[in-house]
Amino acid sequence: MKKRYIFYLCVSSILIQTACSNTKNITMFQTNVEKADYFQVPGAAPEHKIKPYDNLYLSILTLDSEVNKLFNPSLAGNGIYTGTQQMFGDPTSKYINGYRVSADSTIILPILGKIKLVDLTLDQAEDRVMRRAQEYLKEPTVQVKLLNFKVNISGEVKNPGIYYNYEGSLNILDALSEANGYTDFADLSNVTVKRHNGNRIYTHKVDFTNNSIYSSNVFYLQPNDMVYIPPSKLKRRNVNSDTYSKLLGTLSVLLVAASIFAL
């Protein structure tokens, strides 16, 4: 009986040890680090082209405060630009105060009427609205921004959620930083990015453990991209090891009890 008890304890120890795993897939940029004196970085981010149903922030400012309030409902009550635009601080306010591009590719502005903006970059849209505004207003200045540039970051990150971007471009490393980085159990070698293109969704795989990330066609994210960082084998084994530990603990107690009664 004593030999059998020792055997069970040895088996228990082996099972617990097998729950361990290396951390090869949870460290970024580890492959060939000693050889990476330099590597090619991506060029400028592709410019977003306006699509139907995009939500745009559009500001038209003149020297006339009353005209300013007409085109910019989020301005202070005196029609003077404050520089903060606090009414655009949450998704509901963005939706209410933004200009939504209609299915016919246009937006409708007070006085200026319909303006077609689909397939234009934001800079091109500013130029087109400026030329229309100059027909009706004195010395206008125009600014156009995309309000619905959001990405969904989920999985093994510290703060999963939907993140909005107003800088014009967002790369996947900055997006990961927005989510406060990855957890200790992230599998960085098998990150998934899902991207909408028309009525289709394309799946891309990204490996954060080497510098190939910089040459990926999803290094720069696009509006409505979904980034998912899966759990590593280490996490799955740790979850299983908790169960094993409880079972083995119970088994050890039973074995000790049995050995005592066998004496």
Image: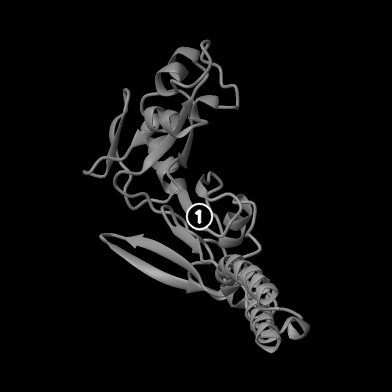
Judged from the image, the secondary structure of the residue bearing numbered disc 1 is: strand
Q: Is residue 234 above or below residue 53?
A: below
Which residue bears the numbered disc 1?
A: 153
The C terminus - image quarter:
bottom right
Left or right position of 169 against 183:
left
- The image position of residue 233, as x and y in percent, is 56, 74
Q: Is residue 171 above or below residue 63?
A: below
Kind of residue sitting beneath label 1 = Ile
Q: Is residue 8 visible?
A: yes
**Image quarter for residue 251?**
bottom right
Residue at the image position 43 percent from the left and 57 percent from the top: 225
Nearer to us in this view, 137 or 88:
88
Nearer to us in this view, 34 or 18:
18
Q: Is residue 77 above or below residue 30?
A: above
Residue at the image position 31 percent from the left and 23 percent from the top: 111
The N terminus - image quarter:
bottom right
Nearer to us in this view, 8 or 122:
8
Left or right position of 209 against 226:
right
- The image position of residue 65, as x and y in percent, is 50, 14
Residue at the image position 39 percent from the left and 62 percent from the top: 195
Nearer to us in this view, 27 or 174:
27
Residue at the image position 44 percent from the left and 58 percent from the top: 226
**Count of residue discs:** 1
- The image position of residue 181, as x and y in percent, is 64, 56
Q: Give the crowd class for mark 1: few <14, some 14-19, many >=20 residues within 10 Å.
A: many
Colouring: one colour
